Image (tube, coloured by chain):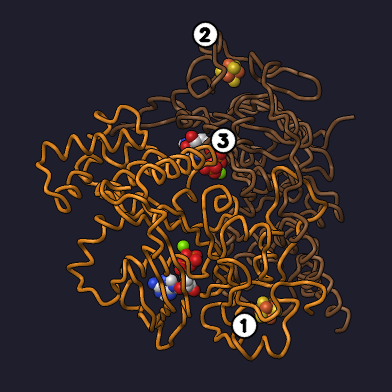
Chain colours: A brown, B orange
C-alpha cells in the first residue's frame, strides 16, 4: 500500500547571483535527493541545524517554492507538475503553520474574518452558517467565541499559534507542515500547543511534517524522524529506534548536545567541534567529515549513500561502528518528589474544575 | 581567579547582592511594574542561573545590574544593587562606564547588536583593553589574539582582522566572550548567550563558559529560559515569575526538591530527550500581561492551590531549607499542606 504522502528525490537548488548583471555565480544546494513517506495520522519530524534545508523541504512539498527536481504524491496524485488551477483544489488538503503566526496573520483582520475566508473560499461554509463554523473551529483549538472579534495583536504567543492552527484546520487538510510551531513559545505554553496538535491528529487523522531543531519535543511528538545535514537525509528511523540507537555520528552528537534538565547527570564529554559548512560549497565526500570524530580517508573521497541498516536508513560509511550511549537513562532522583507534588497540584486542579 | 585574590571559598560575602529591586516602565501615561522585590546573591567562582518564561523580568534584572536600563521609559523604583558593598544605583555614570567592560563583562543573546560592525574583532578587543588597562597598542593586539585563541576561534591571528559579519553566529558569540573577558572581570553577565545558536554550537559555548569560569574564578550570572541549560551549568538558581522571585536554591536542591507550584509546573512541562510520557504536563493559562496590577501572589491566577489569602497577601520569600527560599504560602506542596 502506498503512503498518503510520498516524496521522492526532492531537490531544490537556489541560484546565487552577484554583481550588476546578476549573473549566476553558484547554486545553494538547499535540498538534495530527499525521499520520505508520511502516512495518515502520522508525524514525521524533520530535524537538523539552522540552514540545513528543513523549511525548504516543507515549502517545496507545498509548492510554495518550486522544486528543482523530484516528485511529490498526495494520495497517489503527482502534484509538482499540476497547473495552478488543478493545484487550487489540492491546496485545501495541504496546510502550513509557522513559528511566528503573527507574521502570517493579517493584522487588520479579526480572527473571525481570518477563519471565515478559507471556509468560504473552499465552499466549506455558507454566509449563513460561517459564524457557527468559526466558533466551532475556535473551540476545537481551545479558544472561545469571545476571541472571534479580536485582532492578532491582542493575543499572547500561544493564543496566536492557536489561531494559526485553526486557520490551517479550517480547510480540513490531509497534511500540515508544522515549521517550528513551538520554537518561539515558553515551555508551559509549548506543552499546551503540542498537546493540541496531538489531539487534532487523533481526532482528524491529519499527517504532520513537524520541523524542529528541538530533539526533546521531537521525541515526544514524532513517530518517525528524519535527520538532515546540509540538505540531505543522513538518518531516518522511528523515534524509538533513533533515540535508543542512533546510527549516524551526527545524530549521536545532536542527541548528546541537548542539555538534560537534570543536574545529577551532567555531561562532561566534549561536544562536536566546528560549525555546519556552507550549502554553497558543500565539503566533498561525506558532508559531515570536517566535524566527524570517526572520519577516515574514504569519508573525504566518497559520499556515503543512504542505505538500510536494520529498521534504519543511514548515510555513513561506518554506521555499524557507531556506538550509542548504552547507559539506559535512570529515572533521576529528581523525579519522585516532583511527581508527587505535581499529582497534588493536578488533583486539586481537577477538583476545582469539577466544582464549577 | 585573579592573582593575589586566592581562596575564593573563604570569601563568604557575596560579590553581588541585589536587594529588593523594583523597576517600573512608564508607558503611554501608565506605570507598569516590571520588577518587584527582586533579591539575589552571587558569590565569586559560582554561576547563578536566572530562569523564567519570557517577560518575567530576567533581562530587566541583568540590564539593571549593568545600569543599562533604558531611562525613560525605565525607572528604578526601589532597592539596591551592591557590588562588593558599593551600591551601583548611586554611582555616577562615569564610574559605571569604567566598570562595564572592566570589572563587569557582558554577553548578550545577539552578538551583532553589541559588536560594532565597522571595527574588526581584534580592534574592538584592543579598544576595550586600551580603555580599561594601561597596555600599549602592540601588547593589546597580542593580548587580543591570545583571548581569541582562548575562546577557541580557529586561526585567531587571521580572524582578528575579520569584521563581525564575516563570522558565523557561534564564532561571533566567541568573540563576544573574548571581549567580555578582556579585562579579567569579577562578574560576567550573560543574557541568553546561546538562545540564538544551534544545539551543537550551544554545547560548545556552554562548555567554553564553564571552562573559563573555572580558570578565571569570575562570578557568572547566566540568564536563560532553558531549565536544561541551568541544570547543566549553574551552581545556584533563581526562578522568576511575572517580575518577582518565586524560588531560590542551589541547583541540585531545586531539581530534587522543587517547592513553588510554578517551579513544579515548569519542570514538569519540559519534554525529555531521555524519557517518554504519554502527554506533556502543562500550566493552565498564561503569564499576566504587564499592565495588569498584581494583588497577592503573582502566580495566583494560574495556581490550582490559590485561596483567599493567596489572592490578597503577597507571600514573602522565606527559607524552607538550606539556602532554599520560596515565596508561597503553601510550600512545600504536600498532600498534608492543602
Ligand atoms: N529563497 C532563497 N534563495 C536563496 N537561498 C535560499 C532561499 N531559501 C533558503 N535558501 C538557502 O537554503 C538553505 C536551506 O534553508 P532553509 O531555510 O530551508 O533552512 P532551515 O533548515 O529551515 O533553517 P532554520 O533552522 O534556520 O529555519 C540555506 O543555505 C538558505 O540560505
Ligand atoms: N523598554 C521597555 N519598555 C517598556 N516595557 C519594557 C521594556 N523592556 C522590558 N519591558 C517589560 O518588562 C518586563 C520584563 O521584560 P524582560 O526583562 O525583557 O523579560 P525577560 O525575562 O524575557 O528577559 C516585560 O513585561 C516587558 O514587557
Ligand atoms: S561517512 Fe565518515 S565522516 Fe561521514 S558520518 Fe560516517 S564516519 Fe563520519
Ligand atoms: S501562594 Fe498560593 S497562589 Fe501563590 S503559588 Fe503558593 S499556593 Fe499558589
Ligand atoms: Mg526554517
Ligand atoms: Mg530577555
Residue A168 location, quadrant: bottom right
Say left or right for B316 vs A1.
left
- Mark 2 and mark 3 lie on one chain; the one further toward the N terminus is 3
Crowdedness near tag 3: few (<14), some (14–19) or many (≥20) residues, C-alpha within 10 Å = many
Query: Label 3: chain?
Result: A
The location of residue A44, given as percent across then percent down, is: 74, 39
State yes or no: discs 2 and 3 in contact (Cβ < 8 Å). no
Going 27% across and 57% down the picture, which residue do you hit? B103
Q: Which residue is mark 2?
A: A297
Say left or right for A168 vs B55.
right
Tell me: residue B158, above or below residue A124: above
Going 23% across and 66% down the picture, which residue do you hit? B96
Does the rendering let one see residue B300? no
Query: Label 2: chain?
Result: A
Q: Which residue is mark 1?
A: B297
Element marked by disc 2: helix
Residues at marks 1 and 2, common chain?
Answer: no
State yes or no: discs 1 and 2 in contact (Cβ < 8 Å). no
Considering depth in this image, is A95 or B147 the residue closer to the camera? B147
Give the label, 2 or 3, closer to the camera.
2
Q: Which residue is mark 3?
A: A53
Element marked by disc 3: loop
Give the label, 1 or 3, closer to the camera.
1
Going 75% across and 42% down the picture, which residue do you hit? A330
Amino acid at each position: 500500500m502506498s503512503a498518503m504522502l510520498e516524496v521522492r528525490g526532492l531537490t531544490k537548488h537556489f541560484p546565487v547571483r552577484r554583481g550588476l548583471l546578476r549573473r549566476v555565480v553558484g547554486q545553494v544546494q538547499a535540498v538534495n535527493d530527499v525521499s520520505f513517506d508520511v502516512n495518515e495520522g502520522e508525524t514525521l519530524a524533520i530535524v537538523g541545524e539552522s540552514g540545513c534545508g528543513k523549511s525548504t523541504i516543507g515549502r517545496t512539498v507545498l509548492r510554495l517554492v518550486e522544486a528543482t527536481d523530484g516528485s511529490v504524491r498526495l494520495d497517489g496524485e503527482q502534484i509538482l507538475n499540476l497547473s495552478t488551477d488543478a493545484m487550487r483544489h489540492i491546496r485545501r488538503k495541504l496546510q502550513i503553520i509557522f513559528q511566528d503566526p503573527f507574521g502570517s496573520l493579517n493584522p487588520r483582520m479579526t480572527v473571525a474574518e481570518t477563519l471565515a475566508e478559507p471556509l468560504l473560499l473552499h465552499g466549506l461554509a455558507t454566509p449563513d452558517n460561517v459564524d457557527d463554523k468559526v466558533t466551532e473551529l475556535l473551540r476545537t483549538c481551545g479558544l472561545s467565541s469571545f476571541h472571534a472579534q479580536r485582532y492578532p495583536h491582542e493575543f499572547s504567543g500561544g493564543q496566536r499559534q492557536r489561531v494559526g492552527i485553526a486557520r490551517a484546520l479550517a480547510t480540513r487538510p490531509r497534511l500540515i507542515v508544522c515549521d517550528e510551531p513551538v520554537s518561539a513559545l515558553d515551555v508551559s505554553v509549548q506543552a499546551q500547543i503540542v498537546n493540541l496538535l496531538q489531539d487534532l491528529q487523533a481526532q482528524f487523522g491529519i499527517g504532520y511534517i513537524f520541523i524542529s531543531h528541538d530533539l526533546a519535543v521531537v521525541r515526544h511528538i514524532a513517530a518517525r524522524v528524519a535527520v538532515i545535514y546540509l540538505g540531505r537525509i543522513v538518518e531516518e528511523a522511528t523515534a524509538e529506534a533513533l533515540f535508543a540507537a542512533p546510527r549516524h555520528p551526527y545524530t549521536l552528537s545532536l542527541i548528546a548536545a541537548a542539555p538534560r534538565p537534570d543536574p545529577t547527570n551532567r555531561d562532561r564529554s566534549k561536544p562536536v567541534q566546528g560549525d555546519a559548512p556552507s550549502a554553497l560549497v558543500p565539503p566533498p565526500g561525506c558532508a559531515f567529515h570536517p566535524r566527524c570524530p570517526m572520519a577516515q580517508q574514504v569519508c573525504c573521497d566518497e559520499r556515503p549513500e543512504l542505505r538500510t541498516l536494520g529498521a534504519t536508513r543511514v548515510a555513513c560509511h561506518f554506521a555499524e561502528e557507531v556506538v550509542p550511549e548504552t547507559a539506559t537513562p535512570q529515572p533521576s532522583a529528581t523525579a519522585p518528589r516532583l511527581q508527587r507534588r505535581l499529582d497534588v497540584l493536578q488533583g486539586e486542579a481537577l477538583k476545582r474544575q469539577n466544582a464549577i | 581567579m585573579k592573582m593575589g585574590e586566592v581562596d575564593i571559598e573563604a570569601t563568604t560575602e557575596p560579590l553581588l547582592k541585589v536587594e529588593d529591586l523594583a523597576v517600573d516602565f512608564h508607558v503611554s501615561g501608565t506605570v507598569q511594574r516590571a520588577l518587584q522585590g527582586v533579591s539575589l546573591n552571587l558569590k565569586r567562582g559560582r554561576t547563578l542561573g536566572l530562569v523564567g518564561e519570557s517577560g518575567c523580568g530576567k533581562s530587566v534584572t541583568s540590564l539593571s545590574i549593568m545600569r543599562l536600563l533604558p531611562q525613560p521609559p525605565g525607572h528604578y523604583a526601589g532597592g539596591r544593587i551592591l557590588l562588593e558593598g558599593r551600591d551601583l544605583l548611586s554611582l555616577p555614570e562615569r564610574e559605571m562606564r569604567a566598570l562595564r567592560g572592566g570589572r563587569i563583562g557582558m554577553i548578550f543573546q545577539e552578538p551583532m547588536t553589541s559588536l560594532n560592525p565597522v571595527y574588526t574583532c581584534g580592534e574592538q578587543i584592543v579598544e576595550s583593553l586600551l580603555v580599561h588597562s594601561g597596555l600599549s597598542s602592540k601588547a593589546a593586539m597580542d593580548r587580543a589574539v591570545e583571548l581569541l585563541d582562548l575562546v577557541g576561534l580557529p586561526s585567531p591571528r587571521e580572524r582578528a582582522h575579520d569584521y563581525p559579519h564575516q563570522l558565523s553566529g557561534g564564532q561571533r558569540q566567541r568573540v563576544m566572550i573574548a571581549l567580555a573577558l578582556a579585562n579579567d572581570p569579577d562578574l560576567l553577565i550573560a543574557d541568553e548567550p546561546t538562545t540564538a545558536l544551534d544545539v551543537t554550537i550551544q554545547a560548545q559555548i556552554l562548555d567554553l563558559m564553564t571552562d573559563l569560569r573555572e580558570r578565571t574564578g569570575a562570578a557568572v550570572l547566566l540568564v536563560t529560559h532553558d531549565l536544561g541549560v541551568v541544570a547543566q551549568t549553574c551552581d545556584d538558581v533563581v526562578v522568576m515569575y511575572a517580575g518577582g522571585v518565586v524560588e531560590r536554591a542551589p541547583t541540585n536542591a531545586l531539581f530534587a526538591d522543587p517547592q513553588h507550584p510554578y517551579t513544579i509546573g515548569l519542570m514538569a512541562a519540559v519534554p525529555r530527550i531521555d524519557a517518554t510520557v504519554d502527554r506533556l504536563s502543562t500550566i493552565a493559562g498564561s503569564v499576566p500581561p504587564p499592565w495588569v496590577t498584581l494583588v497577592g501572589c503573582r502566580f495566583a491566577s494560574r495556581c490550582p492551590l490559590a485561596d483567599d489569602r493567596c489572592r490578597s497577601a503577597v507571600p514573602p520569600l522565606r527559607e524552607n531549607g538550606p539556602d532554599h527560599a520560596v515565596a508561597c504560602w503553601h510550600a512545600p506542596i504536600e498532600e498534608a499542606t492543602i
